[in-house]
């Protein structure tokens, strides 16, 4: 199946040990071996999100999108007002998911490649009551990084009852994120991006306030995605007790345990610094040596796990790199789809020493007429 170095913004290249962990023989999902493994993985997830014991991590078979359905079907009732900050395609899709479950969504849309100004958020929250606000930490369509910490401060000041939901699919594991310290209520991610595991797991964390909301919810609008079903399952596993609602993805959890283990071993701070250094190196080269323009042109709002950059002929750049064994991605933002490329530099690929993935990618790109 190998087709080259995968430098799209997820799935990403996985480490050898993660790959090995995926290929282990079957064990029962209720065996003591798996119970211990799952408990340890849930604990590591807490550390990764910087969440304490009062928060509850959930690891459920599915992709990042399942976290949207979970937020929409557990944390709000139909008709609830939700404020979505849109920094691109993924924020807009999250909004569509919320509407599917009957939420009344108001959207504040950032200028293309930028973020929503804090003053606009303050004004909007001051004028109306919202049950939830949704922030996409990194919108993978534009490589825009939102300042979740500052936005959360505004929410706590102006509208403290509003639940804060963060899509961290393209940020957890490569950007600074502090669930407890920033007062986040629900943060969702997926296994295949900066966490460095194959696709197939929805990984999320609930605050004690969000747990209370979910457990006291009167109606249920989802079954597989129900927090009422999943919270006790995760709590049981963490207390070394097997529990069953729906079969966990046993081998994927084993791989996740290894991949988060590798992140924590490296140290969160060191890992994030490495992503910053790689991203800065790559973006600077593209800007200064190739004269290219980034979609997120303001450095303060630029993500560190991927680069979105305008080029004259994206399709040709993508196929030229493919011939050299490097797979990159095209644009997906509706307004600029055919005008840019996206290169992921997360996990194993967040490295710019010679022979590292991103340096090989830059060398291949620099030979092209961009
Ligand atoms: C990839 C991505 C998603 C969707 O995740 P899937 O695993 O493809 O369902 C959601 N939000 C962001 C920011 C993403 O980058």
Image (cartoon, rainbow, N blue to C red):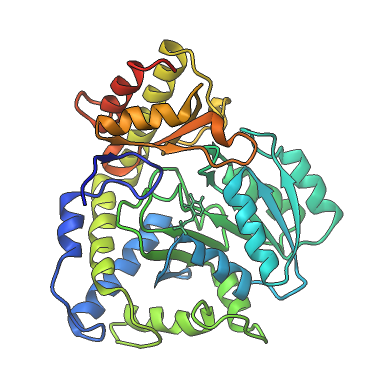
Judging depth in this view, the residue of 354 and 2 nearest the camera is 2
> Residue drawn 71% across and 60% down?
160
Where on the picture, by quarter, is residue 72? bottom right
Judging depth in this view, the residue of 51 and 79 nearest the camera is 79
In the displayed structure, 11 sits above or below 201; it is above
In the displayed structure, 153 sits above or below 367; it is below
In the displayed structure, 177 sits above or below 274; it is below
Question: As drawn, which residue projects farthest toward the right?
Answer: 127
x, y percentage for residue 307? 45, 32
> Residue drawn 58% across and 46% down?
149
Judging depth in this view, the residue of 27 and 235 nearest the camera is 27
Locate residue 361 relative to residue 301 in the image: left or right: left
Where on the picture, by quarter, is residue 192? bottom left
Viewport quadrant of the C terminus: top left
Locate residue 121 relative to residue 277 in the image: left or right: right
x, y percentage for residue 71? 59, 68
Locate residue 1 relative to residue 98 in the image: left or right: left
x, y percentage for residue 312? 51, 21
Judging depth in this view, the residue of 166 and 360 nearest the camera is 360
In the displayed structure, 67 sits above or below 9; it is below
> Residue drawn 57% across and 80% down?
222
> Residue drawn 53% across and 80% down?
226
x, y percentage for residue 139? 54, 44
Question: How many numbered marks does the figure carry?
Answer: 0
């Amino acid at each position: 199946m190998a087709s080259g170095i995968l430098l799209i913004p997820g799935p990403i290249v996985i480490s050898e040990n993660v790959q090995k962990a995926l290929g282990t023989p079957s064990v029962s999902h209720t065996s003591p071996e798996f119970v211990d493994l799952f408990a340890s993985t849930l604990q590591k997830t807490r550390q990764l999100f910087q969440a304490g014991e009062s928060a509850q991590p959930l690891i459920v078979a599915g992709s990042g999108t399942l976290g949207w359905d979970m937020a929409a079907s557990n944390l709000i009732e139909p008709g609830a007002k939700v404020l979505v900050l849109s920094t691109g395609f993924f924020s807009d899709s999250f909004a569509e998911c919320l509407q599917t479950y009957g939420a009344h969504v108001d959207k504040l849309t950032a200028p293309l490649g930028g973020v929503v100004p804090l003053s606009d958020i303050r004004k909007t929250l001051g004028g109306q009551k919202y049950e939830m606000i949704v922030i996409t930490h990194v919108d993978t369509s534009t490589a825009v990084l939102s300042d979740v910490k500052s936005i959360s401060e505004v929410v706590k000041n102006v509208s403290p009852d509003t639940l804060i939901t963060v899509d961290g699919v393209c940020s957890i594991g490569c950007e600074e994120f502090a669930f407890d310290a920033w007062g986040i209520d629900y943060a969702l991610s997926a296994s295949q991006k900066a966490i460095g595991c194959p696709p197939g797991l929805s990984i999320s964390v609930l605050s004690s306030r969000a747990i209370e909301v979910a457990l006291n919810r009167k109606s249920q609008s989802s079954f597989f995605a129900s927090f009422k079903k999943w919270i006790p399952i995760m709590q049981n596993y963490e207390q070394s007790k097997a529990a069953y609602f729906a079969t966990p993805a046993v081998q994927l959890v084993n791989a996740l345990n290894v991949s988060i283990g590798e992140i924590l071993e490296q140290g969160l701070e060191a890992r994030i610094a490495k992503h910053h250094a790689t991203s800065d190196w790559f973006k600077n080269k593209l800007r200064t040596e190739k004269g290219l323009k980034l979609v997120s042109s303001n450095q303060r709002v630029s993500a560190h796990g991927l680069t979105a950059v305008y080029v004259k002929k994206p399709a040709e750049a993508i196929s030229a790199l493919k011939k050299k064994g490097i797979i990159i991605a095209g644009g997906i933002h509706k307004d600029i789809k055919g005008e840019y490329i996206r290169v992921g530099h997360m996990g194993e690929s967040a490295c710019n020493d010679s022979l590292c993935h991103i340096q090989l990618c830059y060398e291949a790109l620099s030979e092209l007429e961009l």
